[in-house]
Every structure is written in structure tokens, then in C-alpha cells.
Amino acid sequence: MSYSFGKNFKVTLFGQSHSREIGLVIDGIEAGYKINRDLISKNLDRRRPGRNEFSSSRKEEDSYELVSGEVEDITCGAPLCATIKNKDQRSKDYDNLRDMPRPSHADYPAYVKFESHNDVRGGGQFSGRMTAPLVIGGSIAEDLLMKRGIKIYSRIKSIGLAEDCEINLDDIKEENFYDFKDQVFPVIDPSSREKMEAEILKAKEEGDSIGGIVETFVLNMPVGIGEPFFDSLESVISHAVFSVPGIKGIEFGSGFEAAKMLGSTHNDPYYYENKEIKTRTNNHGGIIGGLSTGMPIVFRTAVKPTSSISKSQDTVSLKNKNNTKLEIVGRHDPSIVPRALVAIEMITAIALLDLVMEGER
């Protein structure tokens, strides 16, 4: 099913944006693992709506309940199931969308696929709301990766035309990212944060929305994780990341800039350091031939502007079969980038843990 991901650490989502509850089931956690509730709560708080003027005003505490698979926070070998109650729905805001699909939303193709029975409330199962339970699974995966020494960090590289400073891919150090998990707008240059906030507020005041780019760094990945061709490390990460609503593109290492380079410039020379093999540059972004090289994995993800905006837009009436205008009401993020960043980290953790566990078998 499309709601499940992974083989060794398998996550299955359930629920919709306005259903009574949303949640997930995780298969593959060994018995005896001490669940890191503090990490789950921290990541849920990073992602939840209503924290500031840059996100939706929908107020969800995102408190969760573990309903199976553990005894006193210690896993018992059974599938782990967690739920989150939806408390702040305004389903009436979506009544007109049963007839008038929103531009750039899944409303119309879902209407056809599910023969008009699709749930339009808050986007149904297509909503970014579904990344909340994903954070629970991702936090567990992140904790299990950290126990193996593997760490994941992300920053907002840009919002609209406002950009953070460039980072040298050849000299990535963990100290550059030490406070990223504590920032609403994780950036390297603090002055860029104000410019990004201004971009979001400008779009919000105009009844519009704005997108951006998230850059993710995976440190201390062992060499040789992944497979050639269809299960390459890039393929698996990309598959996972594209499951996050609003993602439009991904590139690794030098990415599309590689198309402008000569092989002599793009190739990453090897050298020995403290009995380890490294590369002097990192244009390959930590992955060659679908396998990890031991260098930091670096990829950038393009996040589109939020589809729901308050400006009047052209659409159609499915009932009357004519062209019409749509004005969307309700509460929506002027930019989903800061919250999408957390979801990207979490799904990346799930994908990487699944591959690492495969390599350990």
C-alpha cells in the first residue's frame, strides 16, 4: 500500500487531516528499545502548527499516545502503534471544495481516483497534517541512528529570493549545525533569517504564499550503505522525501551545477587521513554508484508555495461543468518550508535506518 514505507523498519500511516485521529504503525523495532519520548516531543513541537505568525493558526497540541508495542516505554517486540487526536478542525471551511477543486491541490485527481468519495477536509490523506505521526516514527529512527553515530541536520537555504550563505561542501563540520534543532528558522547566517521572515510576511499580507529550499546533511554514514540501480541510496532517499507533501525537486552534492562542470573539476580525489579514506572535495554528496562513501551526505529539497491562498483563483464546478472562481477560506501556512524541514529530516531518518538495518542483517 502507498501508506507504508520500508522493509526492515516499516512505517504505515493512517488517518486524514480532519479524521478523529491520525497515527502510524511501526514494524521492525526490536524488543528492549527504550523509547526516547523527549526526542519525539521535541520534534513534534518543531513541526506543529500555530507556533508563530509564519505558520497556520490551526492549534494542535500534537500530544500522542502509544497504544501498543511497548510496556513502560520499553518495546516488547510487537508492532508499535501511536495515535494523535485531531482537536482543532473546521470542516465547514471546506464545504465548497467538494464541487470546486483547489488549484495545485490533489482535489481533482483524488475526486476521479476515488469516484468523488475523497475527503476534501483539510486535504484529507494528502494533507501535510499527516506528517505529524510521521514525526513519531522519524524520531524513533533518528534516535536509533544516533545510537549508531549517524546524525541528520537541515537548514533553510532559501525562502523565495532570500538566501542563507553558501556552505563549503568540502568542509562540513557538525559544529556548524549545533543549534539547528533549536531554531524555528535554522540558518548559518543569522542575518538571513530576518530576510526570510520578511519574504513570508510579505506573501502573507498579499494573501499569497511562498516556497523555498531545504538543505540536509547526514553525518557519519558508514561506507557501502545502499544498492546499485533501483535501490540506490539516492533513489531510496528521493522516494522517501517526495512522499512529504509539497516537495517538487531534490538534488545531491553539486546537483544540477554538475552539468556545467568538467570531469576534472567534478571528480573528487581520494586521500588517506588517520587510516580512513576520504575525498578532498564532495561534489558527489556522499553517494557514488548508489552507495554511501563515508563523506557527508548532502542534498537539497525544493518546497513549493502553499497551494491554499486567499487570493481569488480560477477553477471549475464539477457539478455544473463550467468555469468559476474560487476563494479559499480557512487557516493555511504562508510558507510550509520551516515545518516541511522537520518532515524531511524525519522521513530521511526512516529511510536511512531501514537501509542501515538491511546492511546489518
Image: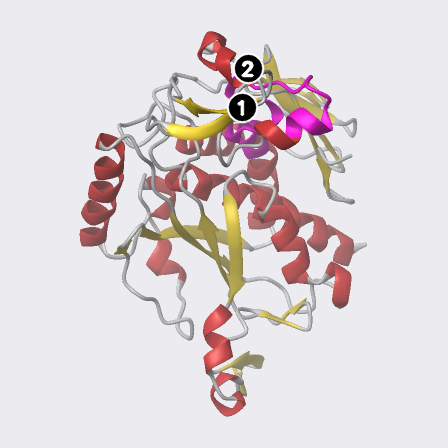
Image position of 86 with respect to 172: above or below:
above
Outermost top residue = 92
For the record, the magenta segment spans: 110-135
Main structural element of the magenta stretch: helix, strand or loop? helix
Between 359 and 333, the one lying in front of the other is 333
In the image shown, does 30 or 264 lie closer to the viewer? 264
Identity of the residue drawn at 48% across and 33% down: 103
Left or right of 219, for residue 1: right
**Residue 184 percent location from the top left of the image:** 32, 39
**Residue 136 included in the magenta stretch of the image:** no
Q: Which residue is mark 2?
A: 18
Q: Secondary structure at mark 1?
A: strand
Label 1 is placed on what type of residue? Asn
Label 1 environment density (alpha carbons within 10 Å; few <14, some 14–19, many ≥20): few
Q: Which residue is mark 1?
A: 322
Which is more N-terminal, label 2 or label 1?
Answer: 2
Can see residue 282? no
- As drawn, is 249 to the left or to the right of 312? right
